[in-house]
Image (spheres, rainbow, N blue to C red):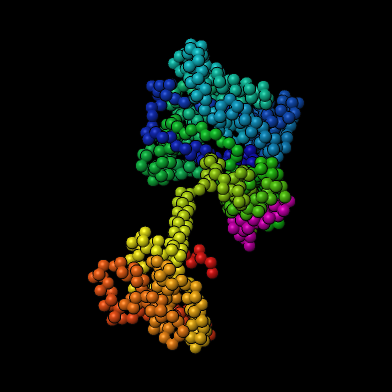
């Protein structure tokens, strides 16, 4: 945002460096003489409003048009109309000196910039209604790239129909053939049309420069004033650059850059043109060194970038002296009060608060600025745009904290300027803090480059977890289906899937239980002597519901439906395998039918193993641990649940 006082708009040239920071793409200076084809160049206009503040006051009060008028801020006349200039009044003259020059001078207070700001945006809006490529430069200046409009007009009408409007730098407009520079001739006519629209609609006069770049258009726009326009032909680029008396007159070279060039011994434009680029790069870096030297040769390929809404809003005031914390707080309150009104009208939420001060200095009066900034909490930012009165004291508190970082209040201090600024402005749709903002995709913009978008890594994670969920669902579904088949219709499964049959034989050979069988007997928490009394009754009740093996073709051994082996049931009233018609050669946990279908050699091998060892199935027991807690031993063959994902999907 431009400084709020016209003094600083005109004199704080340190901001000028940033305005021209997009450097030329050329790596070497081009010839400053002729020889450049007009068809290869852009057409750029620069509009500069005449004595802008004074004109706004004359539009508001037409009676002031024909009298000497000055706009006063504090004790300085920041600008004056051309009637007052005829009496010797100049910009930035003290009020006392101006009154001496022109006793009849009418002074208007211009510290409230509201009217100037509103008129400035009206000018930009009017220009943008003709062409969208309009870039603001302060309150009273605008760049405009009309290359496409010019191309269209040339295609529509013969070149002979055009002539130059206004002045042509270094020559008479009537003596220049438009056929040599048709694009600039068309551009001059468009500039005249736009200046007429500004005067008829807004009552403002302006100067215009027509050239092939922003740099040259700005230089040539001031060749004839007021209310006139000038076109610069490519062959006179060297002449207008050579007419500059100092490096500070080159747009894009501000105060600090000029001081560094002065330290290198560079005072004139010619000095910078012939200075060795490598030595310049040591001071400014290669890219900036090339940009600065290109500007000295009149080369500038920086584009006209539409400014859009202001990137920041600020308010400032200069004064003779502030030397106490109480005065500082009062000034902060005054500045923030007016700025909060503007923020409420703007409707965007600020994200950053910046405080700028200027200490008194007799040697460096205008450029000794210091700044500190910090983020604005979201809840305070929302109060700012809502117009809540609670925002002011909270922002003053933030400002004082920044002030103490800049100034040691235990020692005397002398301030002559204070500026408060809100930056990183977010529109309501871009404001963070709402749930909706996490799901709203925003297109990249120049104002807010910190866009919120769904990252590719997040999308990959979503698809990964979706895949895992589907996989587990399928796994659990078929696992439960297989378990039901094994439990209720094992013969169907064994006949349909030979591999499963062999797995069943192998698991029974190892003395393991099927998952469906592991649920038959509950875990006992009773002492062993009580278990011995209860188990026979339990198994008797179980076997009463089991039909004989003969009525269940292909059924497994009924004894295997519970986890007790022959050895475990000695002394208990549990039916023996022989009473159930099971082949005595087979262990009680082997299905005779499945065993009979095995190859003879495999049967012999299994029989020899069964004779040497007896499989034992253990009853789960509890182990008492110190402290009275118990720790259950895992059942043999039962998979561990410690790191099993399935435990998260099973009910407790």
In the rendered view of the protein, which quadrant contains the N terminus? top right
Which of the image's four quarters has the C terminus?
bottom right
Up/down of 412 relative to 251, above or below: below
Residue 471's place in the image compared with 147, above or below, is: below
Left or right: residue 64 compared with residue 368: right
Q: Residue at x 66, y 50 (%)?
A: 382
**Whole-percent x, y for residue 237 in the image:** 45, 26
The answer to if 497 sits in the magenta stretch is: no
Name the spot of residue 517 as percent of width and height, x first: 45, 71
Answer whether residue 408 is magenta in the image: yes
Q: Is residue 538 left or right of residue 297?
A: right
Front position in the image: 392 or 550: 550
Q: Is residue 616 among what the camera can see?
A: yes
Task: Name the foreground residue: 132 vs 373.
Answer: 132
Quadrant in the rendering for residue 115? top right
Tell me residue 457's x, y (percent).
45, 51
Q: How many discs appear?
A: 0
The spot of residue 117 in percent (x, y) is 66, 36
**Of 240 and 426, which appears nearest the observer?**
426
Q: Residue furthest top?
A: 160
Query: Residue, x 50% and y 13% (percent of image)?
Result: 157
Residue 225 appears anywhere in the view: no
Residue at (32, 70) in percent of width and height = 595
Q: Quadrant of residue 487?
A: bottom left
| Main secondary structure along the magenta-highlighted residues | helix
Q: Residue at x 61, y 56 (%)?
A: 402
Looking at this view, is 141 or 341 the one in front? Answer: 341
> Relative to 613, does residue 143 appear above or below in the rendering?
above
Q: Residue furthest front?
A: 550
Chain part drawn in magenta? 389-411
């Amino acid at each position: 945002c431009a400084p709020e006082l016209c003094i600083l708009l005109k004199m704080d040239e340190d901001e000028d460096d940033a305005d021209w920071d997009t450097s030329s793409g050329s790596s070497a200076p081009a010839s400053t003489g002729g020889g450049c084809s007009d068809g290869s160049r852009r057409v750029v206009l620069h509009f500069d409003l005449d004595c802008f503040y004074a004109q706004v006051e004359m539009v508001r009060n037409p009676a002031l048009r024909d009298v000497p008028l000055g706009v006063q801020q504090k004790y300085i006349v920041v600008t004056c109309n051309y009637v007052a200039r005829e009496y010797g009044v100049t910009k930035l003259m003290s009020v006392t000196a101006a009154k001496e020059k022109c006793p009849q001078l009418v002074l208007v207070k211009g510290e409230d910039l509201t009217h100037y700001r509103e008129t400035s945006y009206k000018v930009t809006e009017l220009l943008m209604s003709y062409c969208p490529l309009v870039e603001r430069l302060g309150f009273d200046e605008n760049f405009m790239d009309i290359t496409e409009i010019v191309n269209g007009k040339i295609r529509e009408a013969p070149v002979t129909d055009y002539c130059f409007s206004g002045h042509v730098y270094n020559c008479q407009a009537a003596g220049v053939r438009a056929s040599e520079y048709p694009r600039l001739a068309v551009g001059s006519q468009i500039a005249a049309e736009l200046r007429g629209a500004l005067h008829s609609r807004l009552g403002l006069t302006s100067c215009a420069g027509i050239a092939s770049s922003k740099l040259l258009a700005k230089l040539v726009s001031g060749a004839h004033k007021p209310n006139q326009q000038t076109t610069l032909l490519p062959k006179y680029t060297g002449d207008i650059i050579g007419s500059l008396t100092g490096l500070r007159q080159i747009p894009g070279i501000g105060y600090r850059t000029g001081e560094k060039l002065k330290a290198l011994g560079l005072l004139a434009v010619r000095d910078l043109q012939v200075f060795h680029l490598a030595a310049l790069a040591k001071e400014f870096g290669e890219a900036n060194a090339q940009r600065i030297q290109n500007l000295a040769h009149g080369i500038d390929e920086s584009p006209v970038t539409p400014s859009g809404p202001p990137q920041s809003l600020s308010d400032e005031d200069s004064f003779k002296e502030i030397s106490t914390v109480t005065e500082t707080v009062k000034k902060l309150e005054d500045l923030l009060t007016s700025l909060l009104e503007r923020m409420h009208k703007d409707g965007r939420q600020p994200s950053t608060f910046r405080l700028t001060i200027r200490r008194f200095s007799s040697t460096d009066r205008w450029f000794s600025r210091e700044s500190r900034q910090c983020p604005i909490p979201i809840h305070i930012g929302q109060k700012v745009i809502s117009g809540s009165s609670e925002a002011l004291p909270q922002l003053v508190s933030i400002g004082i904290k920044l002030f103490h970082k800049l100034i040691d209040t235990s020692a005397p201090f002398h301030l002559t300027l204070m500026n408060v600024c809100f930056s990183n402005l977010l529109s309501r749709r871009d404001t963070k803090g709402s749930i909706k903002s996490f799901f709203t995709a925003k297109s990249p913009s120049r104002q807010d480059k910190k866009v919120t978008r769904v990252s590719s890594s997040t999308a990959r994670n979503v698809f990964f977890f979706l895949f895992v969920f589907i996989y587990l669902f399928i796994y659990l579904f078929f696992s439960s289906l297989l378990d039901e088949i094994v439990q209720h219709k094992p013969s169907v499964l064994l006949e349909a899937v030979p591999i499963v049959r062999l797995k069943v034989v192998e698991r029974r050979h190892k003395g393991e239980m099927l998952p469906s069988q592991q649920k038959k007997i509950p875990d006992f928490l009773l002492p062993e002597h009580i278990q011995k009394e209860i188990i026979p009754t339990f198994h008797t009740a179980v076997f009463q519901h089991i039909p004989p093996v003969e009525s269940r073709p292909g059924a497994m051994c009924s004894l295997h439906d519970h986890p007790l082996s022959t050895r475990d049931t000695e002394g208990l009233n549990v039916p023996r395998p022989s009473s159930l018609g099971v082949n005595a050669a087979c262990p009680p946990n082997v299905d005779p039918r499945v065993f009979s279908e095995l190859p003879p050699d495999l049967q012999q091998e299994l029989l020899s193993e069964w004779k040497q060892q007896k499989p034992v199935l253990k009853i789960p027991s509890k182990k008492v641990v110190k402290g009275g807690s118990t720790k259950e031993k895992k059942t043999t063959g039962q998979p561990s649940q410690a790191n099993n994902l399935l435990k998260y999907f099973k009910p407790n």
